[in-house]
Each structure stands twice: as C-alpha cells, then as structure tokens.
Amino acid sequence: MASVLHTIQLLGLAGVASYAVGRMAVRSGLLVYYRYAIVATPRDAMPAMPAGYVVRPVEPDELAQHVIDAPARLQADRFAQGMTCLGAFNKGGALVGVTWLAPGGMVEDDVNVRFAVPEGCCWDTGLWIVPRFRLSRAFAALWAGTAAWMVERGLTHSYSRIADYNIPSILSHRRMGAMTLGHHVFFKLGRWQYSTATRPRLIRHASDQAATLSLGPVPH
C-alpha cells in the first residue's frame, strides 16, 4: 500500500489515470494514447564529466558499426533532421551510450509532431545506455557531454518529452533541476492523429505532414 501511495504522490492522479487510459487504449487495438510531460533541463545543473569518459559526436558511418536501441531507419531519420548523435566512450574505448540533440526541435517518431523549442534551447531525445553499463557513470557522462555541446552553441536549456508515468526518467530529470512546462495529450485512431495543442490539430499520421507544437520559454 505504501508503494502505491508513493507512486501516486510522484505521478499525481493525472499521471496514474494517464497510465490506466494508455493501457486500455493498447488493449483496444484501435486507439493509441500518449500523454507527455514537457520538461526543460538547465545546462548549469547538468553533471561534470566523470573521470575516464569521453563524449563526442558520432557520425552515421561510425554509428552503423554499433548496435543501439534505435533501428537504422530511425537513425537515418534523425540524422536527416540535422540531429547530433553524441556517443559516450569509457576508458577502454567502448561505446557505453548515446543521446540525440537538435538545436531547433525535431519530429518525434511515435507521434508525428514537430516539437519546436524557443531560441537558446535544444531538444534531446533517445538517451540510451548499453545494458551492461547501466550501473556505471555512463548516464552522467552523456549529460556532461550534452552540457559541453550546449556551451559550444550558447544554449541554456534542453527540452524533452517524458511519458508522464515514466518514474525513473521523471526522477532523473528532477535531480538535474528540470522544470515541467506542461502536459500534452495525443490520440491516434487508424490513420489519424489528434491533439488540441498542435497546429493543425488533426492530421493523417502516416503522411509527410507533421503537426507542430510550439513550446514556450522557461519561466523566470
């Protein structure tokens, strides 16, 4: 009972309800439902680079030599959008994880929406750690590399989306001082996708047209 109450306290009733609705939508086989928290993580709160790690951009040809969570099709789409793939390498030279960054935002793969970030910010997505290195400092290294990449470009905050019931991700972002800017709901039914927050609100999900969600600046 205590663990249930703790989960509700972390997620809020809306997050718990979102998880339940999402599960029911999957079981229906007809409707797909997403509810995302949009968070902004300040560069200055990101960790310092841990000893023994190097983080640098990884080009498509080099990335193709590694097995990561993103399939080749998704990698190609991200590179085509102008995203940077940062790879973290340990002192033995092994790739321990990756993350993807875009200065102006990107069209995500699960919802056909361009998340447009304000000037001075970037979008981060797809942070992934090689399973055998998940108890190492790889996570901290990737965020330290993200901060260095942002410094080079004069960026102050990194925006990202989190499923509002993803407790580990919510907690890790909170530890870095991330601010939740809002929650947005997306529905997919057959070939159609709808959200009140995007422009246009209704699109054909499989089309080349992406809706746009313009994200506001971080409140001061």
Image (tube, rainbow, N blue to C red):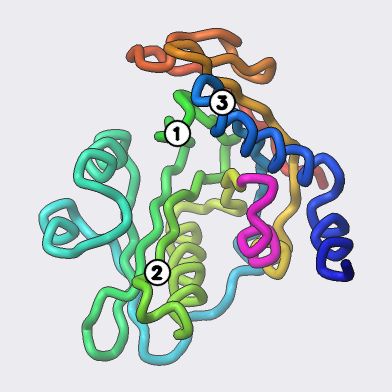
Q: Label 2 vs label 1: CA separation?
A: 20 Å
In the image, residue 98 lies at what x, y percent? 35, 63
Residue 99 left/right relative to 123: left
- Tell me the crowding category of disc 1: few under 14, some 14 to 19, or many 20 or more residues within 10 angstroms, Cα based: few
| Closer mark to the observer between disc 3 and disc 2 | 3
Q: Amino acid at mark 1?
A: Asp
Question: Residue 15 versus residue 30: which sits nearer the camera?
Answer: 30
Residue at 62% over, 38% down: 23
Residue 110: name its quadrant.
top left
Q: Amino acid at mark 2?
A: Ile
- Tell me the crowding category of disc 2: few under 14, some 14 to 19, or many 20 or more residues within 10 angstroms, Cα based: many
Residue 120: name its quadrant.
top right
In the image, residue 153 lies at what x, y percent? 45, 52
Question: Residue 113 versus residue 85: which sits nearer the camera?
Answer: 113
First in sequence: mark 1 vs mark 3: 3
Label ID, residue 85 = none
Q: Is residue 26 magenta?
A: no
Is residue 113 placed above or below 80 in the rendered structure? above
Label ID, residue 129 = 2
Q: Which residue is mark 3?
A: 28
First in sequence: mark 3 vs mark 2: 3
Label ID, residue 110 = 1
| Closer mark to the observer between disc 1 and disc 3 | 3
Residue at 39% over, 52% down: 100
Count up the numbered dots: 3
Q: Label 1 vs label 3: CA separation?
A: 18 Å
